[in-house]
Image (cartoon, grey):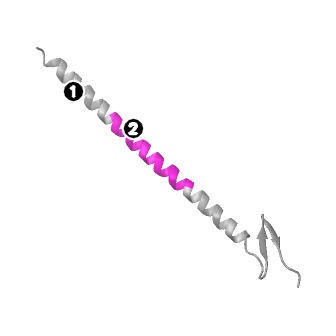
Amino acid sequence: MSYGNVDKSDGSIRFFERKLFLVLIIALVAGIIFTASFVLVFDTQSEEVAKNNLLPPDCYSINGKQVCPKR
């Protein structure tokens, strides 16, 4: 039996393990960046919507239309 082939296969396995580890790290970082940007975009949009939805006293909103009872 030749141990030369075992050493080569062991080296290639280490190479693929490192490559797999690197791909997993990149995927994890990309997922974190995507999630953070997704949360930040919708958070800023919800703040803008909340600012625009301020109604005067005694008024209410139905289907996005402002209704104020006449006095």
Q: CA distance from mark 1 to mark 2?
A: 20 Å
Q: Label 1 belongs to which residue?
A: 10
Q: Position of residue 18 (x, y in %)?
A: 31, 36
Secondary structure type for disc 2: helix
Q: Relative to residue 29, is residue 48 drawn left or right?
A: right
Dominant secondary structure of the residues highlighted in magenta in the image? helix
Instruction: Reply yes or no: does residue 61 show up in magenta.
Output: no
Secondary structure type for disc 1: helix
Q: Relative to residue 31, is residue 46 drawn left or right?
A: right
Tell me which corner region of the image, top left, top right, bottom left or bottom right, holds residue 70.
bottom right
Q: Position of residue 5 (x, y in %)?
A: 19, 18
Q: Amino acid at mark 1?
A: Asp
* Image quadrant occupied by the C terminus: bottom right
Residue placed furthest toward the bottom? 71
Q: Label 2 belongs to which residue?
A: 23
Q: Position of residue 45 (x, y in %)?
A: 65, 61
Query: With respect to residue 22, does 34 lie above or below?
Result: below
Residue placed furthest toward the top? 1
Tags 1 and 2 in contact by the CB under 8 Å rule?
no
Q: Relative to residue 46, is residue 64 drawn left or right?
A: right
Residue at 61% in and 58% down: 42
Binning the other alpha carbons within 10 Å of mark 1 as few (below 14), some (14 to 19) or many (20 upward) gives: few
Which span of residues is magenta-colored?
19-38
Tell me which corner region of the image, top left, top right, bottom left or bottom right, holds residue 47.
bottom right
* Image quadrant occupied by the N terminus: top left
Residue at 73% in and 69% down: 52
Closest to the observer: 50 or 16? 50
